[in-house]
Image (cartoon, rainbow, N blue to C red):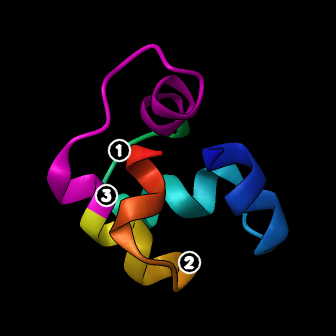
Amino acid sequence: MLKKLRLRNGYTIAEIAKLLGYKSKSGYWALENGKVELTMSKIKKLSKIYGVEMKIFFE
C-alpha cells in the first residue's frame, strides 16, 4: 500500500525518505517493503503527506 500511495502521488523513494527524516532512501525502502514496522509517528507523517486518514494504514 505504501508504494501504491507513493506512486499515485508522484513521489520517488528518495523524496519520501527525506520527508520522513531518513538519511538515505534505503530506510524508507525497508519500510515500504515490510522489512521494518511502520511506527505511529511515520503513520502521522505519511497521512499528512498523502492527504489520507491514518486509519488506512491499519486496514
Q: Is residue 19 above or below residue 2?
A: below
Dot 2: element: helix
Q: Is residue 48 left or right of residue 41?
A: right
Q: Is residue 15 above or below residue 40?
A: below
Quarter of the image where one finds residue 23: top left
The amino acid on which the numbered mark 1 sits, given as a three-letter code, is Lys
Q: CA distance from mark 2 to mark 3?
A: 10 Å
**Would you call the spot at circle 2 few (<14 residues within 10 Å), some (14-19), or many (20 or more)?**
few
Dot 3 corresponds to which residue? Answer: 43
Dot 2 corresponds to which residue? Answer: 50
Quarter of the image where one finds residue 25: top right
Q: Which residues are magenta?
A: 26-43
Dot 1 corresponds to which residue? Answer: 23
* Residue drawn at the location 35% of the way across and 60% of the way down: 20
Queried whether the magenta region covers residue 37, the answer comes back as yes
Dot 3: element: helix
- Closer to the eye: label 1 or 2: 2
Q: Which mark is residue 58?
A: none
The picture places residue 32, in percent across and down from the top left corner, at: 56, 34
The first of marks 1 and 2 along the sequence is 1
The first of marks 2 and 3 along the sequence is 3
The picture places residue 45, in percent across and down from the top left corner, at: 31, 70
* Residue drawn at the location 38% of the way across and 46% of the way down: 58
**Would you call the spot at circle 1 few (<14 residues within 10 Å), some (14-19), or many (20 or more)?**
few
